[in-house]
Image: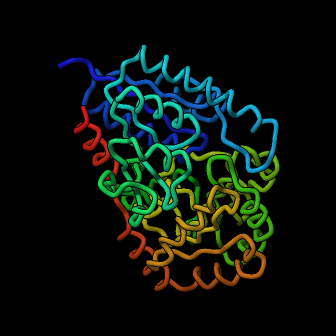
């Protein structure tokens, strides 16, 4: 059999990069001598994260359209032409069997060119409300792997397969890691643990909320693992108690061992990016979603709502935090029945075999 070659593209945020890496890892485990190339947007997160995962990456000079008239927008046509030209060069030289896009700016020109050159393409859409890039690409794509139901009015129905989002395999069985997690994270077994997740870059409004609530959390005998994001770490690291005194707050920029923090958590506060939502379904902890209002088409609210509607989580909008948060949090903390119900319901929405299913679909196109 000839040597298989795959190009993957996804980036801008961890939510697009991680699924692409998970798909590549699964392909690699099935075809150990296959060749892989990633394509990302220059100066975005993927240019560091992908090489850290052991894959080569090429950068395109591309960025999204801003919603207002800016110099960046004036440059867009030039960036697009440059990216289409470079994508063509990459594809002609690398000669992939299949091209896979997981969203983000760079996947647009790359998959567009692959479609023009009649190379099979697969789109993996993480959100319950697709972005403009994937909507445009879907007309020519061979397969569209989705994580939510009812996307027929965005994508051609006959091309869609409901697979779920790829998640880290080490999250599948976290219950068995609780003791290791408590030991590793230096936690007090007599306190409840709150895990706060603001996404890979952080979330200003969530950080402001936690800062304001620290005294209240201390009074409730709750210890906090607070991932504030690399953009905000300098502002909030002063709250790190590192186990000093009787109140434990651990402030971190980024979490490497997600399996351990999930295992230790009793309650999770999280943004509602697609990858986070999929992970939280598998982990099955009680969650309060605080969707980011600053994303395209408000898709985080739609992602969270799809879980809340099935009684699998609670949701607070940013505008409700000052008036509602302490009431909602305290009520949940003191109601173990409610915690169990949320855990049970969110777990039923998990699709743990997503990566394998997506790769099955890719293999059919070879």
In this picture, is 106 found above or below 330? above
Q: Is residue 220 visible?
A: yes
Above or below residue 228? Residue 90 is above
Where in the figure is residue 183, as x and y percent of width and height?
51, 54
Q: Residue furthest left?
A: 1
x%, y% of residue 332? 58, 81
Residue shown at the point (54%, 45%) measured from the top left: 133
- Total labels drawn: 0
Q: How is the image coloured?
A: rainbow
Specify whether 360 is left or right of 336: left
Task: Point out the image quarter for the C terminus.
Answer: top left
Query: Residue placed at 42% from the left, 50% from the top?
Result: 167
Left or right: where 354 falls relative to 153? left
Q: Is residue 170 above or below residue 321?
A: above
Does residue 263 appear in this view? no
In this rendered view, identify the residue nearer to me: 174 or 270.
270
Seen in the picture, residue 124 relative to 315 is either above or below; the reply is: above
Left or right: residue 294 versus residue 94 is right
Q: Residue, x 31% and y 34% (percent of image)?
A: 27
Q: What quarter of the picture does the N terminus occupy?
A: top left
Q: Position of residue 9 (x, y in %)?
A: 48, 34
Q: Is residue 132 left or right of residue 238?
A: left
User: Residue 330 at what x, y percent from top left?
Assistant: 65, 82
Looking at the picture, tell me which residue is in the foreground, 27 or 4.
Answer: 4
> Residue 117 or 315: which is nearer the viewer?
117
Q: Residue at the location (58% across, 60% down)?
A: 187
């Amino acid at each position: 059999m000839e040597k298989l070659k795959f190009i993957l593209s996804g980036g801008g945020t961890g939510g697009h990069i991680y699924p692409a890496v998970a798909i590549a890892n699964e392909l690699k485990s099935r075809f150990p001598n296959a060749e892989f190339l990633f394509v990302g947007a220059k100066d975005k997160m993927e240019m560091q994260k992908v090489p850290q995962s052991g894959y080569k990456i090429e950068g395109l000079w591309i960025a999204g359209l801003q919603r207002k008239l800016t110099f960046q927008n004036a440059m867009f046509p030039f960036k697009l032409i440059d990216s289409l030209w470079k994508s063509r060069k990459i594809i002609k030289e690398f000669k992939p069997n299949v091209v896979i896009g997981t969203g983000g700016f760079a996947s647009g020109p790359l998959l567009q060119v692959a479609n023009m050159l009649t190379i099979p393409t697969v789109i993996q859409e993480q959100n319950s409300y697709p972005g403009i890039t994937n909507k445009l690409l879907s007309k020519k794509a061979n397969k569209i792997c989705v994580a939510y139901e009812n996307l027929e009015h965005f994508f051609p129905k006959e091309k869609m397969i409901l697979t779920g989002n790829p998640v880290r395999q080490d999250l599948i069985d976290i219950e068995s890691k609780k003791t290791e997690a408590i030991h590793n994270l230096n936690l007090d077994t007599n306190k409840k643990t709150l895990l706060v997740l603001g996404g890979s870059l952080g979330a200003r409004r969530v950080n402001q909320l936690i800062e304001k609530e620290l005294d209240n959390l201390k009074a409730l005998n709750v210890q906090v693992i607070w991932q504030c994001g690399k953009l905000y770490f300098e502002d909030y690291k002063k709250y790190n108690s590192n186990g000093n005194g009787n109140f434990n707050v651990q402030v971190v920029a980024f979490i490497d061992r997600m399996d351990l923090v999930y295992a230790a958590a009793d309650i999770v506060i999280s943004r509602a990016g697609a990858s986070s939502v999929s992970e939280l379904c598998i982990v099955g902890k009680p969650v309060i979603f605080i969707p980011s209002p600053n994303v395209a088409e408000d898709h985080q609210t739609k992602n969270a709502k799809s879980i809340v509607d099935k009684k699998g989580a609670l949701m607070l909008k940013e505008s409700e935090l000052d008036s509602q948060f302490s009431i909602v949090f305290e009520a949940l903390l003191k109601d173990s029945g409610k915690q169990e119900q949320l855990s049970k319901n969110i777990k039923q929405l998990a699709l743990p075999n997503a990566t394998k299913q997506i790769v099955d679909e890719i293999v059919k196109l070879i």
